[in-house]
Image: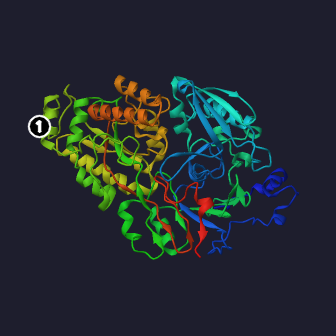
Amino acid sequence: MKKQVLSLLLAGALTLGLFGCSAQTPEESGVPQSAPAQTEGTASAGVVEELKIGICKEVTPRTLASESGSFGRMNYNAFCAGTWLVRDENNEMQPNLMTSWEILDKGSTIRATFATDQGITWHDGEPFTIDDVIFTVDLMNNKLKSGYLSKITGVEKVDDTTVDFQVADGAAYFTLGNSAVFVRMYPKHIWEGIEDPSGYTGEDAVIGCGPYQLVQVDEEAQTMHYEAVGETYMGRALTVRSVTVRSYDSQDALVMALRTGEVDAMYDYSNPISPTMLPSISGVDGVDPGRGMNMGLFEILFGFHKQPTDDLEFRRAVRYALNYELLATTIGGEDGQVPGGGIISPAGIGYDDSLPKLVQDQEQAKAILEAAGYIDTDGDGWRERPDGTPMDVLVTPQYNATKAALYQRIAEIIVTNLGEVGVKCTLDEESIRNSDHEQQLRDDGAYEIYICYATQGVSFYKTPFLYMFNDDLSMWGTCDLEDFDQAYNDMLNAQGDEDYVAKVKELQRIASEEVIGIALCWDTAYYPYRTDKYEGWTNFPGWGVINCETWYNLHPIG
């Protein structure tokens, strides 16, 4: 394979922005032109010279317009791109480039102040301005078609630091929560001339205004190297001076790298290591398992565009047929818990503990199927549809290269359990090995029983209900039930924390009654990290120790 190394220092204009006002050559800048050596990395007093992070997302073409791959996911941590808002260890929104805000006009206006007066520049030296903020909203809504700011219908400049966002349906509270972490800044002077921003990967596509700048990519070694923009950022000391991100083929390989000290910490957004791998890191000297609340969950989505999964009675039967004790152990290991009927996990915003735990009752499943007309009419052991036609339900696991075996095992359990009540199923093995096939099935809404992992709680946008909802903004959903539709929109228009929680609970009630989806396990998340070189780690729910505070708090031990 031909080695491909990206260096932002190739362009003279970028050199000025990255390394000061004097025109330096790459050699004069002191930045190596090949992949950084994998050394132990000595740290000067008080600062971490090189933090080494392991990840399982592939190093792919770099662009601020992408959320995929290791570059895109790192930007969730107020890293290279620079985010509007961040979330703390309690999952509460905190200022970042948006330094303050007010909700006005009964939720129809957000007056937001940005750090455009704090001397922040883009990594090419251009100043960060309020025009960049206005441009970012336009780009995300009209060209990138992102859902994070979809409720913003207009932007009015108040002064050089402040804008008024006009928000549809009084959804200011939701829009702020929706933007936290995931909305990053785009430089107008670069992106305004790009016709297809979603596919743009030019050298300047990585120019952000965050505390770190991308300086090297080695696609053969699957590494990226970042340097701090200075000793401070927005008045805070950056204690981590450089970051090297390396992608591994599997979580097994990543865990081994942690055990040997090849990397200092793991980061893999929405994809913590499987709890079944816990024995491989428990009790290892210098390694903390990084145990925390799991903000996501494995779940089933039903295809509302297909028969029989569009039938409530059939979905009710499926819910009774499944062995939740086995699923909880398979997914969550010793920490796995049988879930409840409301989808939101105990770690999520608005969790409703009044909804009962799910139970397996295959006799009840059989009775529901019989009453609904799903009967074995030809004596072959498999039930036919009420109209007498054969039934073979497709069970589709979400594609996940690092957890393919786990998804397959979950699917096998579901196929077996449904077979025990007379429902013939086929495991969609093509989706396990072919991401294009699986994505097309979701995009077309052509699945019947879809096994997926839903993130939640970190952003309102990422509640698991979005994955069920049949809407242009939904990733996978097919549900178009009117009551669910209305309740979802009511949630978007919540006017504060208390109102939001109440409406999330109403969504859980409807989801439970209509069996729109089925949670498969409540489990614990593990993002392991080493404790023998550095201190100051903070374990964020849903993120682990690689988060927006690490860059300012991590220090060498002693």
Determine which quarter of the picture holds residue 185: top right
Residue highlighted by disc 1: 379
Above or below, comparing residue 320 to residue 293 in the picture: above
Left or right, 91 with respect to 132, comes to left
> Judging from the image, what secondary structure is the residue with disc 1 in?
loop
Q: Position of residue 443 (x, y in %)?
A: 46, 35
Q: Position of residue 527 (x, y in %)?
A: 46, 61
Which residue corresponds to the image point at 23% horizontal and 53% vertical from the top-left?
A: 325
Furthest residue to the right?
A: 22
Give the colouring mode of the picture.
Answer: rainbow
Which residue corresponds to the image point at 54% horizontal and 30% vertical from the top-left?
A: 172
Instruction: Judge by depth and name the residue closer to the eye, 100 or 316.
Output: 100
Q: Amino acid at mark 1?
A: Gly
Q: Is residue 360 visible?
A: yes
Q: Is residue 446 visible?
A: no
Q: Locate the C terminus by quadrant.
A: bottom right
Instruction: Judge by depth and name the residue closer to the eye, 241 or 468.
Output: 241
Which residue corresponds to the image point at 36% horizontal and 48% vertical from the top-left?
A: 298
Label 1 CA crowd tier, 10 Å (few <14, some 14–19, many 20+): few
Instruction: Judge by depth and name the residue closer to the eye, 353 or 123.
Output: 353
Above or below, comparing residue 36 to residue 496 in the picture: below
Q: Position of residue 387 (x, y in %)?
A: 20, 25
Left or right, 148 with respect to 23, comes to left
Above or below, comparing residue 250 to residue 187 in the picture: below
